[in-house]
Amino acid sequence: MTVSRRDRVVVVGNGIAGRTACDSLRDSGFDGEITVVGAEHHPPYSRPALSKAALVDGGELTAHRLPEPTHGATELFGTRARHLDIERRRVSLDDGTDLPYDGLVIASGSRARRLAAGDGDGQAEGAVDEVTLRELDDAVVLRRRLAGRPSVAVVGDGPLGTEIASGCLAAGCEVTLVSRGRPLADQLGPYLSDLFTYAAREHGLRLAYARSAGVASSGGHPVVVLDDGAHLEAELVISAVGDVPNVGWLATSGLLTDGELRVDTRGRLRPDIVAAGDVAAFPTRHGIRRVPLWTSAVERSRGAAAALVHGDAAAEVDFHPYFWTEQFGLSLKACGSLPAPGVPEVVDGDPATGKALLRWPRDDGAGTAVALNYRYPVPKLRRLSRATPGDGI
């Protein structure tokens, strides 16, 4: 199917995936009507900034802001999609409105997984005071609570959990991170995990190890319950234990496979329906999976929008991962697959000083390059990740 200028496209989701899809529809030549449905009341913003600069910046919360859009879409913020009828081509909203479409972009994202309240959408009244950081409103609340310098327990040893822990330390809090093992080992690999763990300890982070943890209430205060039965007390408990894709509104659509929204290499579910961002699982070198990264959302949304307009003539998306993090005085940019196994080749600098250009080469050319506190343009880092030993910088 090729979407004509007379057609209407509905984009469900006002995050970076939805925003990029709107821009890319225009770039692909679509000049028809676009309507964006977004559950949040805010315009699209940089979600990664919430656990980085936006969490610790003084004064106004501005690090998350994006440029004003130019796509000219009708934007319905603070509105949720509740049902999809693919035969009638209708998206039903929670205010009772039905939106007809000729092309649909599903970019409804995901929500924070909770320890105490399950995976439901929102936290029940009277539930344990468990804080998550997923949306802009979460960041506003967390910044306000950190102003009192409470003792903090962060549950979750991935990038979000460690970035939050770093931000809480910078705010002057006493922080304990509950980790299943070496922090960041599952995401970055053992070598980089060791570098970040050392830096974290040097900044005053405390570590508590547990294969699993829960959150309960004791005397009106939240406590972290470790798998050995021990209780970790803190004035503020923050969980960063993953996300849950927002696919509930698609339950009767017939689009889900084993509960997942699985798209092809162009982001398509049907000729008239595409999906991108955290909600979608797509083919990778390691199988069909969700890749909840900012760059994944951007690249997949561009490809999905082009496929909605041009069909098979649109290029397949060859996603090459890019990841960055800032925490405990370290800035890391990585191109290529992670976690990185073993010890890298040191291209330049010295990891012991905290400043280095590293490379993990692989025989298939799909290597990984990392700039650690090292100023290096991302395009050059991508080329370095695909280089062979001896190519230099």
Image (cartoon, helix red, strand yellow):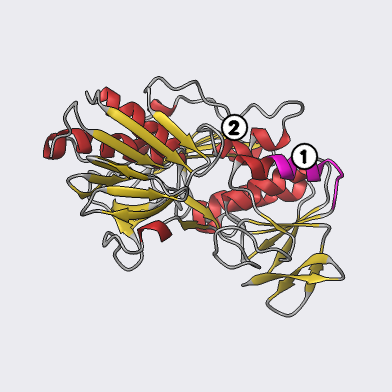
Which picture quadrant has residue 65?
A: top right
Could you say where residue 208 lies in the image, as x and y percent from the top left? 73, 65
| Circle 2: element type | loop
| Circle 1: element type | helix
Count the numbered circles shown.
2
Looking at this view, is 19 or 287 the one in front? 19
Which picture quadrant has residue 178?
A: bottom right
Could you say where residue 17 lies in the image, as x and y percent from the top left? 40, 38
Q: Looking at the picture, which amino acid does disc 1 mark? A: Ala
288 lies above or below 147: below
In magenta, the rendered stretch is 140-150
Q: Which residue is mark 2?
A: 373
> Which one is closest to the eye, mark 1 or mark 2?
1
Question: Is residue 99 one of those drawn in magenta?
Answer: no
Q: Between marks 1 and 2, how big is the CA–CA gap?
A: 18 Å
Q: Looking at the picture, which amino acid does disc 2 mark? A: Asn
Looking at this view, is 57 or 43 the one in front? 43
Which residue does the image show at 37% across and 38% down from the upper left? 385
52 lies above or below 257: above
Looking at this view, is 377 or 260 the one in front? 260
Question: Is residue 144 one of those drawn in magenta?
Answer: yes
Q: Residues within 10 Å of mark 1 (few under 14, many from 20)?
A: some
Q: Earlier in the sequence, mark 1 or mark 2?
A: 1
Which residue does the image show at 68% across and 77% down from the upper left? 227
